[in-house]
Image (cartoon, grey):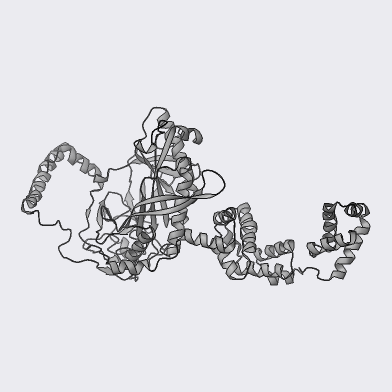
Amino acid sequence: MSALSRDDVAHLAGLARIDLSDAELDRMVGELGVILESVAKVQEVAAQDIEPMSHPLPLTNVTRPDEVRPSLGAEAALAGAPAQEQQRFSVPRILAED
Amino acid sequence: MATAVTEDVVDYDEALERYDPVMGLEVHVELNTATKMFCGCATEFGAEPNSQVCPVCLGLPGALPVVNAKAVESAIRIGLALSCQIAPWCRFARKNYFYPDMPKNFQTSQYDEPIAFEGHLDVEVPAAIGDGTEIFRVEIERAHMEEDTGKSLHVGGATGRIHGAEYSLVDYNRAGIPLIEIVTKPLTGAGKRAPEVAKAYVAALRDLLRALGVSDVKMEQGSLRCDANVSLRPRAAAGSEQETVPLGTRTETKNVNSLRSVERAVRYEISRQAAVLDRGDRVTQETRHWHEDTGVTTSGREKSDAEDYRYFPEPDLVPVAPTPETVERLRATLPEPPSQRRRRLQQDWGYSDLEMRDVMNAGAVELIEETVAAGATPAAARKWWTGELARRANAEGRAVEDFGVTPAHIAELDGLVRSGRLNDSMARQVLDGVVAGEGGPTEVADARGLELVQDDGALEAAVDKVIAANADVAQKVRDGKVQAAGALIGQVMKELRGQADAGRARELILAKLG
């Protein structure tokens, strides 16, 4: 894996809606780089004859019948919301003004 | 972007002289399962906001999804009905994005392992030449399982749109409802008929999904949604193959919520892109929004590259691996394909191609089928549903189903005509009564005193009276001008307040003046 660039981190920060200062960007390039290097070590262990896995258990077709189960109820669902209005979750402006 | 900019467009026919349109259609269909894709929350439309949510569909920490068995079966049945191959093993994937309509910050979807792939759907479109129809084969790239998103209300700003809004309110009832996304391969070769092909494809898909019973397929409620990708490429030079010309840059138009809009939106996008290319500019790859009221598309966000979604296999779900036995069991549940069914019904009913097309355009195939089953002749069923009721519905901007007239009513009305109790104009009056809610046809005919004069004596007396009063016309008929008898028949009908058998009146008049 090629090294993470400062531009890569700025791009990711943009997607994540996280505002990073120049100093923070520099720090994150280093910190994320270390994480990526550590993960990359796994690839040294993985041999050609080992299939990549997405789940630790060799199971398939775990399903449930199409039967309704009780929901939380709006009050409980909204209890943890920082802000609510009209029985809905209130979220900050989605698009920046342009 | 506060105001929509009116963009230049090129006349459609002119655009087609210089450019070849290529389309890709993505249809999202909400399944009609009782519960969501990964949790047991109900899926009822129009419920109180956030009343059908739980830790799984709210993405609360530690909540684990479990796949809805019926949704997987519906997905496989849809794939089979589209002549797709069914994956013997496939996984879900996380599609990561940052938008509050999914509380998890990702949508559980399928990426490079769709449950169904490589299929096709044959659709009927008006023939390039002549009045008939011809088959256009739409190749299906894939059909995959995913979940729907929540619904946002945008507050502040003038229009309720996301642009200029101060904040948004989100209802997660819809988040997690099973969706199947059906993606076509690039549709080439439609040429000028591209908008019609797009509409016919969505209509055929809707009919198919309805026949499968897997969805409500109500475009106006959003249970069937279409995104239309359109691009233009230059027309090939004379003597060279159009297929060798590389594809142009595409736009993806969303918010296309009716069959008519599918056709209009594709047509508009062709005219708009042609103007961009004519100016020597490049088409911007972006998402555009269709506006039903103004009939234009406007620019939305620029399209993310697929990598930006950082797809990866969903670690909380195990693979779906339908056995061949399961696939064959589901294949045995497929209904007769709608196009085959239409051909069979057309043959049974003895309709011409044009008549069948009218019936299909009026959306009256099922109504006529039920009416014939209730005892009406196919010709009468067609006449009443497409000639009379569809005409009224069009004129009044209503749906045929809204009149409260049932197939049983029409069969009963046809019975009254065939038994000789009513003539055509009386039958129309009876229908007025049924539409007005006065009861069934027999009831209305009784209440309004509508009944043909069956007594030849009364009819003969009226004929004699009319001949005597119109001696000049009668003489013309005697001299061989048979068409003049029409005026006399009209008088006789008037004399009997319309309650006579016009055919019998004609016979009597011609016999007397023969």
**What percent of the width, then of the height, locates residue B2?**
41, 38
Q: Nearer the viewer, residue B149 or B320?
A: B320
Q: Is residue B171 above or below residue B335?
A: above
Quarter residue B215 falls in: bottom left
Quarter residue B502 falls in: bottom right
**What percent of the width, then of the height, locates residue B236?**
40, 33
Q: Residue at x 28, y 66 (%)?
A: B324
Q: Residue at x 55, y 49 (%)?
A: B132
**What percent of the width, then of the height, locates residue A93?**
33, 46
Taking the image as shown, residue A63 lies to the left or right of residue B78, namely left
The quadrant of the picture occupied by the N terminus of chain B is top left
The quadrant of the picture occupied by the C terminus of chain B is bottom right
Q: Residue at x 41, y 43 (%)?
A: B289
Q: Nearer the viewer, residue B384 or B298?
A: B384
Q: Is residue B498 above or below residue B311?
A: below
Q: Is residue A12 above or below residue B315?
A: above
Quarter residue A85 falls in: bottom left
Q: Is residue B8 visible?
A: no
Q: Is residue B502 visible?
A: yes
Taking the image as shown, residue B274 lies to the left or right of residue B489, namely left
Q: Nearer the viewer, residue B159 or B462?
A: B462
Taking the image as shown, residue B249 lies to the left or right of residue B127, namely left
Q: Residue furthest front?
A: B239
**What percent of the width, then of the height, locates residue B182?**
36, 54
Q: How many marks?
A: 0
Taking the image as shown, residue B173 lies to the left or right of residue B311, namely right
